[in-house]
Structures are given as C-alpha cells and as structure tokens.
Image (cartoon, helix red, strand yellow):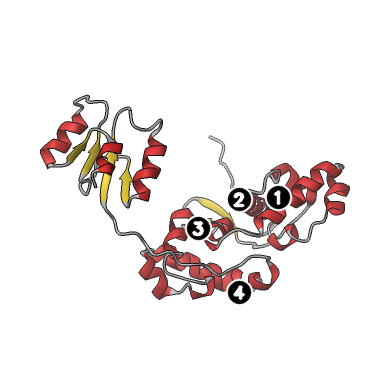
Amino acid sequence: MKQIIPPTDCPACGSHLELVNDQLFCRNPKCPAQWDKKLEGFSSTLKIKGFGPSTINKLQIQDYSEIYQLTVEDIQSRLGSEKLATKLVAEIEKSKSSKLQELIPAFSIPLIGRSAAAKLCSVVSDVEEINESTCSKAGLGPKATESILNWLQMDYYPNQYRDNLPFNWKNKIVEKKEVTGVVCITGKLKSYPTKAHAQKVLESKGFVVKSSLTKDCNYLVNESGIESAKTQTARDRGVIIINNIVKFLGEL
C-alpha cells in the first residue's frame, strides 16, 4: 500500500501546518482561505444578502473592516454592475444596526453560537463586560468561556473592533420572564396552523416549549386525540394533557 504523506504547509498561505488529533491546522491568522470562511460566516450571520463566496473572492477583502470601507464605485469596478453594487452597499449599511446578540456569533468564535450569545446578552450590557464572572453567571461552560475570552484578547482588543467596526457594542439587558411551565407539542394541531405559530404564542405567555417529552415537562399538547406512546408516558408521569391550546390559555 502506498504511504500517504500529509502536507506540511498550508496550500493557501504557505504557513507550516500543525497536526492535532490527526487533523492539520493552519495557525496563520491572516490565511486568506480562513478569512474567506470567516467573511462568509460573518455576512451570513448578519444577513448581508449577495455577499457569498464568489463575491467575497472577487472583492478581494481580507478583513471585517474592509467590508465597511467599500463604496459603490469599488464594488462596481470589481463586479462590473452598478445595480449589484448599489444593492450590496445597501445590505452592508443595514448590517450596521445589528444588535450585540447578533454580532457575537458572527465572528466565528469556537463554541460561541446564537445560544451562547443569547445567554451572555442576558447578563452583560456591553461586550467589554464579558469576563470569567459574567460567563459563569450566563451559564457558559469552561471551554466556551475560554474561547470567547481568547477572542476578546486576541481579536477584539488588538484589532480595535470598537473603533474600526461600525457597530453598537452595547446591549439592553432584557429581564427574563418568569417561566409559566414546560410544554411539549405532539401530533397535528387544530388551534394553530403550525407548531411554530403555537410555540411563539406559548413562549409569549412564559412557557418553555420543547420538542421532546423531557422529565421537566409538566404539559403535553395533544389536540389530535390520538393516544400515542408519548401521550401514555405523559399520563404515567402525571403531566397535564392540553386538548386545545387557545382554550387552555384562556383559562389561565
């Protein structure tokens, strides 16, 4: 069998590759291939329409701040379309109003997605309030905490994101609503057209909606009337069965 010799250098930037747990990593923070992926994730998270891989490649940008330096003329000269350039600039402008909870997941921070960002934004009023204590208060684990603190020290502060990126890094803390109960929805609904619609209504009333019948569920929505295994399990646990969500909410 022919021996496979792994590459030693990154094909995108030529930096030495590091082998960790049978995987090769390029540690060059300026690697163009890494930046292409970072910018794709950034534009996707902030919903900058039209800013896909092909556009990023043609615009030859290698930093978040370069997105916000682009003019209609810059984009038109590289993409050859004034109409497209005008649309892209409008999309970039809209992204400037992104809230902190939307910004944090946009920077490709390992282990820090929408859920972790939401937890952090429930306890901090500014990105610079993120520290070991506030991460613990938000319920982040040690690895996620280490990841976002590394991002602050290695990216946010050194690159002066507060000054160089046109965002409001402050956050209005929204007090958590008192939890009314934990609900699981099963089967077809009659009171609402979709489960998503029903979930939105229930959450507005303080309920936590789960996709499965967990041990902390105290309500099961079953408007179909079919006695499924899930319904029987709920009865065995003493879970309250809701036959009509609208009627149930009206009786609260």
Q: Is residue 130 above or below residue 233?
A: below
Q: Is residue 236 above or below residue 126?
A: above
Ranked by sequence position, the earlier of labels 1 and 4 is 1
Q: Which residue is mark 2?
A: 41
Q: Are marks 1 and 2 in contact (CB under 8 Å)?
A: no
Q: Secondary structure at mark 2?
A: helix
In space, the residues marked 1 and 4 are separated at their CA atoms by: 26 Å
Ranked by sequence position, the earlier of labels 1 and 2 is 2
Q: Which residue is painted at 27% across and 42% down in the image? A: 250
Disc 1 vs disc 4: which is toward the camera?
Answer: 1
Local crowd size for mark 3, using a 10 Å CA cut-off: few (<14), some (14–19), many (≥20): few
Local crowd size for mark 4, using a 10 Å CA cut-off: few (<14), some (14–19), many (≥20): few
Does residue 128 appear to the left or right of 144 in the view shown?
right
For badge 1, the amino acid type reads: Glu
Q: Are marks 2 and 4 in contact (CB under 8 Å)?
A: no
Ranked by sequence position, the earlier of labels 3 and 2 is 2
Local crowd size for mark 1, using a 10 Å CA cut-off: few (<14), some (14–19), many (≥20): some
Determine which of the numbered discs, if any, sits on residue 157 in the image.
4
Disc 4 vs disc 3: which is toward the camera?
Answer: 4
Quarter of the figure with residue 177: bottom left
Local crowd size for mark 2, using a 10 Å CA cut-off: few (<14), some (14–19), many (≥20): some
